[in-house]
Amino acid sequence: MQFGLSKQELRDIIISVLVLGFVFSYNRWETISIGIRNFFIAVFVIGIAFLAHELAHRYVARKYECKAEYVIWPAGLLLAVVLTILSGGNFIFAAPGFVMISTAYATRLGFRYVNLSREEVGKIALSGPITGIFLAMLFKLLQPLSKEIFTYAISINLWLAIFNLLPIPPLDGSKVFAWSISIWGFAIVTASVLFILYTMLEINFIISLIILIAVGLISFLLMETRVPTIF
């Protein structure tokens, strides 16, 4: 399995990471030296999150004999910068681009249809935010090594997961929502609960995992029984 990025895709990812680095570190510039340090920390953390997110999309897409390619969204970049400045860094719009999912061949060996099904598109889209959630859980375990950096990494990965799961095109959440409302609900509730437990309440990993499983299962069952899956 190859994960090579095209020059254009790599360029788009780098630009997006730099812009998000500015956005996430905007209100952390007490002094120039501190600001520069926080900017590079943000770029490093977001770079890992972005790369993991894209590789997850790519891996699942290729499982379905198709391709997923990150494309920059100029309007999203501009909106992210403008809203950050106007809000003093209190509101973060984290959609500098989106993933284009398409079939790469005239036929897909082993699959009934050439075109992707709604379920396949949903699973490809879901893989990105889910990867961010698992990264946040990993960073929670590593948090004792460096509370500042790993707490920051946790918050960024979960924030990106929550934002990407919003059911608004062209975000991943719109594709997951179109496939299965119950799975979408489970994913966004999971990310939101973890964000509260890890960044606001700072509850330890084991207790937060127990709470997460309970809340996640309840949300999934409620949506599964009350809201039918969209086909």
Image (tube, helix red, strand yellow):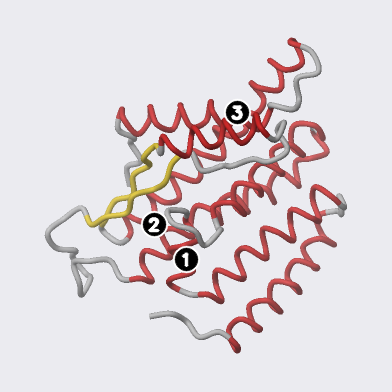
Q: Is residue 102 above or below residue 97?
A: below
In the rendered image, residue 117, in percent from the top left (x then y), is placed at 31, 71
Residue 141 falls left or right of residue 22: right
Q: Is residue 15 above or below residue 205?
A: above
Helix, strand or loop at label 2? It is helix
Between 203 and 101, the one lying in front of the other is 101
Foreground mark, 3 or 2?
A: 3
For residue 176, which numbered disc appears in the image? 1
For residue 87, which numbered disc appears in the image? none
Q: Hey, what amino acid is under mark 2?
A: Val
Residue 190 falls left or right of residue 74: right
Q: CA distance from mark 1 to mark 2?
A: 14 Å
Q: Is residue 78 above or below residue 1?
A: above
In the rendered image, residue 42, in percent from the top left (x then y), is placed at 65, 28
Q: Residue at x 33, y 49 (%)?
A: 100
Give the mark, 3 or 2, whose residue is nearer the N terminus. 3
Q: Which residue is mark 2?
A: 60
Give the mark, 3 or 1, whose residue is nearer the N terminus. 3
In the rendered image, residue 40, in percent from the top left (x then y), is placed at 64, 21
Q: Which residue is mark 3?
A: 21
